[in-house]
Image (tube, rainbow, N blue to C red):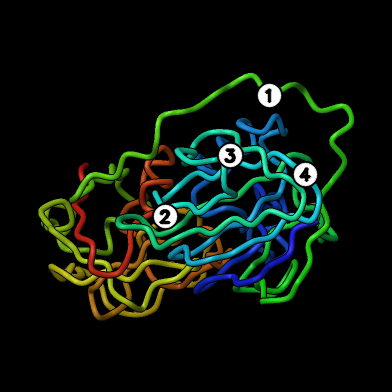
Amino acid sequence: MIEILSPGAYATVQDLGRPGYAHLGVPRSGAADRRSLTLANRLVGNPEGHAAIELTFGGARLRFPRPCWIAVTGAPCPLQVPRGHAGVGMCAPVWMPAGSELGVGVPAAGLRTYVAVRGGVDVEPVLSSRSTDSLSGLGPAPLRAGQRLAVGPVAGLGPITVDAAPPLSLPRQPVLRVLPGPREDWFAPAALGVLCGGPYEVTAESNRVGMRLSGPVLPRARTGELPSEGMVQGAIQVPPSGSPIIFLADHPPTGGYPVIAVVAAADLPLAAQLRPGDHLHFRH
């Protein structure tokens, strides 16, 4: 099992989410940075979809009563590991002896860090997923100090074959590629150019549901209300204020504000690592 000595600012259990239930009003949820989650699982020989711990702003401390393999990926954090493990860092499988503790510091850049354990975090699944959904409340509650998490069986898992992987690269002012629409016609003809002119700043009113941005206002060509329609992760929804919001992992399945563009799926892991105060650009 894993003992949570301190969860840091905000920690949850995440896997690849619960797709296929949007028509019932259930968000997909899952890891905000899917690329870092799947990497952590591969490093310890797990299937990519096994559940792991997602840390926000690091600052956690975990204890492992039994020996196990772990890997830490995502936003780069200083690690405190048992004596004799000096030099061990992120993006590599790490052997944790029985009773050892892992300390995860605060990242200098980036937002979300993942801790995978060989066998996966074995909490009770809800709708075939172990993910915490901060919007609907499905899945396990956010982690708290003193909590214990079961670890799944390791029998039948493949061998650990990788010594290390490249660390996460985080540009100072990332560029997110976007596809226009589906409601581009609700905006002034120059609005998409304004969006891609930027820059925009991530505000503190951001979480796993969506990332609110401040910057150039996107003018509308149409007024009135838009009937609620289906939403996807990466949708850039624009409320009447004209300030865009990027929908992230826990976004609602429907929304009533027009979507001017959608962030390319390949750039969503980078978007998930942006923190309040970061600046970004969009590119058509």
Residue 122 picture location, percent across and down: 82, 53
Residue wearing tag 2: 272
* Label at residue 160: 1
Q: Which amino acid does the dot numbered 4 rest on?
A: Pro
Q: Amino acid at mark 2?
A: Ala
Badge 2 crowding class, 10 Å Cα cut-off, few under 14, some 14 to 19, many 20 or more, is many
Q: Which mark is residue 40?
A: 3
Check if mark 3's residue and mark 2's residue have beta carbons within 8 Å: no
Distance from the alpha carbon under mark 4 to that under mark 3: 18 Å
Q: N-terminal of the two: label 3 or label 2?
A: 3
Q: Amino acid at mark 1?
A: Ile
- Which residue is painted at 18% across and 67% down in the image? 218
Q: Sequence order check: which comes first, mark 4 or mark 3?
A: 3
Question: Which mark is first along the chain, 1 or 3?
Answer: 3
Q: Amino acid at mark 3?
A: Ala
- State the separation of the CA atoms marked 3 and 2: 16 Å
Give the spatial CA distance, label 4 vs label 1.
Answer: 15 Å
- Quick one: label 4, few (<14), some, or many (20+) residues within 10 Å? few
Residue at x-position 83% and y-position 57% = 150
